[in-house]
Amino acid sequence: MNVLSLFNGMGTLRQAFHDMNIKIDKYYSSEIKPYAIELQQYHFPDVIQVGDINNWKEWNIDWKNIDFIGSGSPCQDLSSSGKRNGINGDKSSLFYVFIDILEHVKKLNPNVLFLQENVASARKQDIGVMSRALGLYPCRINSSLVTAQLRDRYYWTNIKTKQDGMFSDIKTDIPQPEDKKINFNQIITSGFSKREKSKCLIKRRSFCYKDEFSDNAQRFLRTREKFGVIVIHLKDGTMRTVNKTEMCRLQGFPDNYCDILNEDKTQSLLGDGWTLPIIIHILSYIKK
C-alpha cells in the first residue's frame, strides 16, 4: 500500500500497519511539529515527510498510486474543551484541506480508502457538515473499551460501510471492539487511584512529577483534579499525575515508545494522537 497520512502526529497509523504486518511501499507524512517528526523517524526512518498540509499542491507525490489517506484533522474548534468556533474555526477548518486532497486522489484512484477521526463532543451540525463532505456518516467508538482511558471519538471510513435508514444513508460499519475491561489501577506503575478509568489524555491536563511533592505541588494537583486530571495516590501520602509509561499505556503503545522524548513532549503527542488498538481494529477490516 501507498499511504498518505495528514496531521500525522506521532505516526499511530504507521505503527498500526506495522503491527498488522501490512506491507507499506511508501508512507507520506504531513506534519509540522518537530518532535512529532523526530519520534516518527526514530521508529520508521523510511517515512517520507512532505511538510505543511497547506502546501499540498507542491508535494512531490505520485497521487494516482495513493491507496489510503489518514486524517486526524484538528479538533480545537470542535471539542467541548475548546472555544467552540466550529468546523469553520481557524484550526478545525483544515478539515476542508483534507477534503480537497481526498477529492483530488479520488479523481485518479476512485478506490482510495480513507480514515478521518474527530472528537465525539463536536456539535451535531459540525458532524453533519463533515459527514456530507465525506459522503458517509461515522461510527462512534470510545477508547475505554480497549484501554484504561475515556476517549470518545467519531471515525469516518469507507473501509466497511452499509446503507441504513429511510434514505439509505451510507454509514461507517465498523463494529465496536471487544471490551477488554482494563482498569486504570491495572496500568499504573505505582500507587492507586479512586477512578476506574482515566479522563481523556490531553496535553494541557497531564503533568508528571517525579520528585517529592511540596505543599504548593499538592495544592496544584488537587486543583487539577477538579478539572478531570487523574491523581495517583502514593503510600507515603504524596500524590502524582501520570508518568510517561502510563501515558503510553493509556493510548495502547508500548511502555518505551516515547523514550526519546521528555514528559512534556510525550503528553503533547499522545494527547493529540490516536489510540493504537482502535486504529488496528478499524484497519483489520481491510483484510476482511
Image: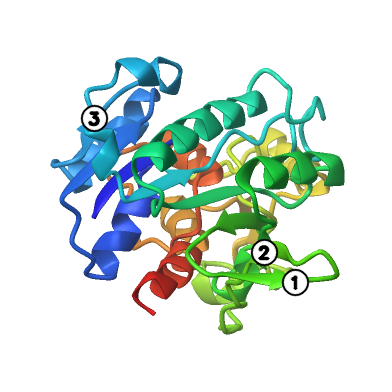
Residue 39 occupies quadrant: top left
Taking 77 as reference, is 195 above or below it? below
Decide if residue 173 is on the left or right side of residue 209.
right
How busy is the neighbourhood of tag 2: few (under 14 within 10 Å), some, or many (20 plus)?
A: many
Dot 2 or dot 1, earlier in sequence: 1
Across and down, in percent, residue 219 comes to 76, 39
Depth order, front residue of 165/198 = 165
Q: Is residue 174 visible?
A: yes
Q: Kindly identify which residue carries mark 3.
A: 61
Task: Give the numbered dot on residue 119.
Answer: none
Instruction: Give the secondary structure at mark 3.
Output: loop
Residue 258 located left or right of residue 199: left
- Residue in view at x 15 percent, y 51 percent: 25
Residue at coordinates 67% horizontally, 62% vertically from top-left? 170
Mark 2 and mark 1 residues within 8 Å of each other at the beta carbon:
yes
Please tell me whether mark 2 sits on a helix, a strand or a loop. Answer: strand
Q: Alpha carbon of mark 3 to alpha carbon of mark 2: how far?
A: 30 Å
Residue 171's disc is 2
